[in-house]
Amino acid sequence: MWPAEEGLYLAQANLSPYSGDTVHQSPLVLAVVWIASMLRGEAGVAVLCIALDCLLAYGLVYTWRLHAQWLTLKDDDANRKAPPVIKSVDSYSAHLPTLVAVLYLLSPYTVLTCVSLSSAPVLYLAVLASFAFALRASYNLSTLILALATCVSHYSIVLLPAITLILISEQSSKLGGGRQRQPAVVPVVLYACWLFALLYISSLLSQSWDFVPASFYFT
């Protein structure tokens, strides 16, 4: 039985999913799995995992192209002065994002995580989306999704400095439609507020704070 499904089984039996040493997923993940299982049963959970992988593949393509625009803004003068040989080589990289997406979908690791109904794609998608929104200087969405990734895996907090540097960059401001650049403390404060809000919502879902040691102390 998938640990998340075992957690749902314990919750339906009026037992804490985190009373043992099996379930380490966030209550938010358990809630998503519960909704999928209520809609389509076990097939719904499988469809959810497949949909997450498809979104990840699309996210890889989207983020790649967005990052290419970000680099173009950063090195605009250098690109204009680049010799024809370099420009011709860059033209061949137009199909690389699609190739990366296909390789991701056909990767044995991706197939195994999908078959085993792992919650790892939720984390990967959240991290990827956080970077994508950061490249467009979307402070609220980027920090919110990074806080969500932290709820899934506390190791995601190490990405906060990188997300902050991208958000406050001039290139992200231009990609975001000329949004005003903010001090570096703004993304940090937003992230802390979102994280506290998500933890509070998680405590309401699980009706206790037992998930904190189970989810955050587990390595």
Image (cartoon, grey):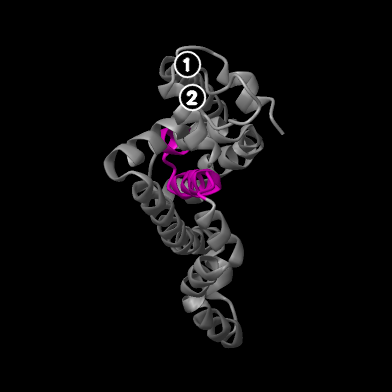
Q: Nearer the viewer, residue 209 or 15?
A: 15
Q: Quadrant of residue 165?
A: top right
In primary-sequence order, the first of circles 2 and 1 is: 2
> Could you classify mark 1 by the number of other residues whose Cα lies within 10 Å: few (under 14), some (14-19), or many (20 or more)?
some
9 over 137 or under it: above or below: above
Q: Residue at x 56, y 87 (%)?
A: 84
Q: Residue furthest right?
A: 219
The kind of secondary structure element at disc 2 is: helix
User: Where in the figure is residue 129, as x and y percent of width and height?
Assistant: 46, 47
Residue 4 in view here: yes
Residue 183 in view here: no
The kind of secondary structure element at disc 1 is: helix
Which label is found at residue 203?
1
For the magenta stretch, what is the residue range? Answer: 117-143
Which label is found at residue 10?
2
Q: Is residue 1 left or right of residue 45?
A: right
User: Where in the figure is residue 137, as x and y percent of width and height?
Assistant: 44, 43
> Could you classify mark 2 by the number of other residues whose Cα lies within 10 Å: few (under 14), some (14-19), or many (20 or more)?
some
The question of residue 59 being in magenta is answered with no
Q: Residue at x 50, y 64 (%)?
A: 68
Q: Nearer the viewer, residue 37 or 195?
A: 37
The question of residue 142 being in magenta is answered with yes
Q: Nearer the viewer, residue 131 or 25?
A: 25
134 over 73 or under it: above or below: above
CA gap between label 2 and label 1 equals 16 Å
Q: Amino acid at mark 1?
A: Ser
User: Where in the figure is residue 127, as x and y percent of width and height?
Assistant: 53, 45
Image quadrant holding the C terminus, namely top right
Q: Amino acid at mark 2?
A: Leu
